[in-house]
Every structure is written in C-alpha cells, then in structure tokens.
Image (cartoon, grey):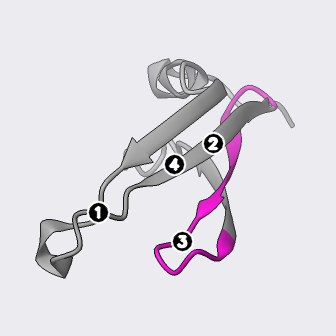
Amino acid sequence: MKADLVDEHRWLQQLTGRWRLTFNPSQESGDMDGGASWEETARLLGDAWIVAEATGTMPDGSAATNILALGYDPARKL
C-alpha cells in the first residue's frame, strides 16, 4: 500500500545524505575538553520514511551506533 504523501513527507526527504556532526558535551558536565564527532548516513525508506545510521565515539571513548527512523502520520498531525 502506497502512502499519500504530504508536505511533511517531502520535508523529511531533505534530511537524506551524509552528515558529519561535531559537538561539545553539556556545560553542566563541567568537561568542556571532550568534544565528539559522529558521521551519519540517512536514506529514504519508500517515500514517506527516512532511516539514519550514525557512528561515533561516546565520552568514555567507546564506539557507538545509533539507528533512527523518522516518518510522519498525517492522521495524527504530530
């Protein structure tokens, strides 16, 4: 069953591609020396969803992977 696309689905499509994320930990932690760099690849799943996979290093130095799926349900308008 093919989804009826709305503007919000088309907006999600702009998030596809390869991204590099660089950030510093929260100032509340008191450790401003430990910045982090992650790389993320986001792709379309059909026309109504994107799936993004990011890899990077956690503050303790361990490797981490994050997988995210984003979509929009026009019936819920959320």
Label 3 CA crowd tier, 10 Å (few <14, some 14–19, many 20+) = some
- CB atoms of marks 2 and 4 within 8 Å: yes
Mark 3 to mark 1 CA distance (whole Å): 13 Å
Magenta highlight on residue 60: yes
Q: Residue 37 carries which label?
A: 4
Q: What element carries label 4?
A: strand
Residue shown at the point (22%, 64%) measured from the top left: 32
Q: Which of marks 4 and 3 is nearer the N terminus?
A: 4
Q: Is mark 1 on a helix, strand or loop?
A: loop
In the image, taking residue 38 as reference, residue 41 lies left or right, namely: right
Q: Name the residue under label 2.
A: 39
Q: Residue 33 carries which label?
A: 1
Q: Which mark is residue 58?
A: 3
Q: Earlier in the sequence, mark 3 or mark 2?
A: 2
Mark 4 to mark 3 CA distance (whole Å): 9 Å
- CB atoms of marks 4 and 3 within 8 Å: no
